[in-house]
Amino acid sequence: MRIWSVRSFFCTGLQVALICSSPFALFSQNTSKASPAAAPLQPYGGCPAPSQEGINICGVGNGVGITSPFQMVAAGTSGRGQVQLMELWADGKKLSQTEGTPFNEPIALEVGTHELTFVEHDVTGAEVKSTPIQVIVQFAGSGDGDCPVPDAPGVHVCEPVNASGCQSSGDTVAFIAAGKGKSGTVSRMELWTSGTKLANFPGDRFYTNVLNQFYPTVTFWINEVDSKGDSIASSPIVVGGPC
């Protein structure tokens, strides 16, 4: 089933999350080799904070259709003090919050249209709200995607499989993976592309959906990082192809 959604997971402005006004941003540094690329790391999650007070949303665009859970990324700047935490509100209820900035979390919502708003709080007690955006959840997955942990140390990628078929910009790409530690228990899983860490996921598995902005072809890597700091990267995951 093909899902259309925001055209860019890294955007600028408030169309972000994939169509926004800032880039696709999900993550940053890594232990071991996050990917073969040696390029400088981009802002965590590919989402830079605005130069002036405000919130840059980079994970889902306004009016976009997407599959749940989906990755929401946003970075904030305060005009008064350091950003202390960021909250995500959906339909008038707080869904999640993270310390500091950026916010980079998989979000699960029921099928239907939802209004999302970010709220940034700084150390002075001041707050800034983003302009609300609407997302249309067309399909809702559940659990962790039923992806088993591999028998040997490494990363088991259940989705996506290397795909040579057409993958248009704006299509939803599901990422479902599980890891086994090289020398300890898995502390987190990381999603990378071209020297940019898109996201961190605590524990040994994760399930999220992102919008494909890297048309026509993009290569991803998934790392498991264990409790002793060792890391194993998956084989390159090539998504997309000419349409």
Image (cartoon, rainbow, N blue to C red):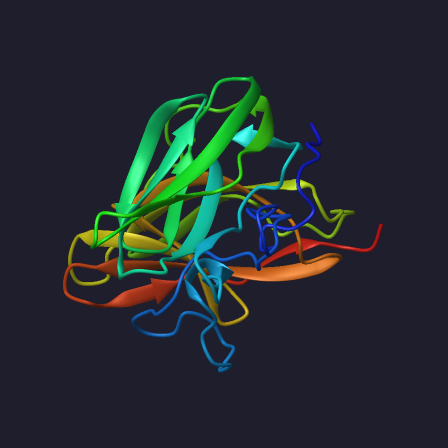
Q: Is residue 27 visible?
A: yes
- Please provide percent x and percent y for residue 53: 43, 58
Of all residues, the one furthest to the right in this rendering is 243
Looking at the image, residue 2 lies above or below residue 34: above
What is the total number of numbered labels drawn onto the structure image? 0
Q: Position of residue 30 (x, y in %)?
A: 33, 69
Residue closest to the eye, 237 or 80:
80
Would you identify the image quadrant in which residue 227 lies?
bottom left
Residue lying at 50% horizontally and 62% vertically, measured from the top left: 46
Nearer to me, 81 or 207: 81
| Residue at the spot 51% in from the left edge and 81% down from the top edge | 39
- Which of the 4 image quarters holds residue 118? top left
Along the horizontal axis of the image, is 67 left or right of 208?
right
Relative height, residue 77 to residue 120 (above, below): below
**Residue 146: x %, y % from top left:** 40, 30
* Res. 146 visible in picture: no
Q: Quadrant of the N terminus?
A: top right
Judged left or right of residue 200, residue 197 is right
Q: Is residue 197 left or right of residue 136?
A: left
| Vertical side of 12 occupied by 94: above or below | above
Q: Position of residue 157 (x, y in %)?
A: 46, 47
Instruction: Left or right? Give the position of 68 relative to 205.
Output: right
Residue 92, quarter of picture: top left
